[in-house]
Amino acid sequence: MMLDIFNNKPANNVKFMLEYLEKKFGEQAVNGRPNELINLQRHVKELESKLKEKQGEASEEESARSLGSHEDTDEDESDDYIDDLPEQKPVGSRGPRASVSAEAFGAWN
């Protein structure tokens, strides 16, 4: 198609491409495949309904959590804090250097 556009140099490229596709593929090029479109629309509706169901389940779980007793929230809060942090080694105490660059031992030093 691109070669034909280059060779023919039409005034309206879009119209030329549509006519080219219609000649090559028939009405399918212009109208598409109606059955495939219907199947895709049905699939989209199914996915949307599943999404709505999951959103409904999630909102039910959130409301059930918010209705929990006061004792449950106290236990959760106590787990949020750590009494003692583990000790960390200081960054500067790695020990002596393990290797030295060969440039330091050149004839110019």
Image (cartoon, rainbow, N blue to C red):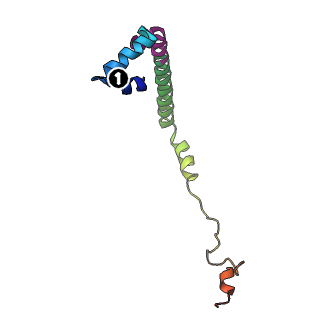
Q: Which residues are magenta?
A: 29-43
Q: Is residue 32 visible?
A: no
Q: Quadrant location of residue 106?
A: bottom right
**Residue lying farthest to the left in this orientation:** 11
Measuring from the top left, give residue 34's x and y in whole percent: 44, 9
- Residue at mark 1: 8
State the residue in front, 104 or 58: 104
Placement of the N terminus among the 4 image quadrants: top left
State the residue in front, 56 or 8: 8
Magenta stretch, main secondary structure, is: helix
Could you tell whether 102 is left or right of 12 in the image? Answer: right
**Residue lying farthest to the front in this orientation:** 7
- x 47%, y 32%: residue: 63
Could you tell whether 9 is left or right of 46 in the image? Answer: left
Measuring from the top left, give residue 100's x and y in whole percent: 69, 80
- x 65%, y 78%: residue: 93
State the residue in front, 84 or 14: 14
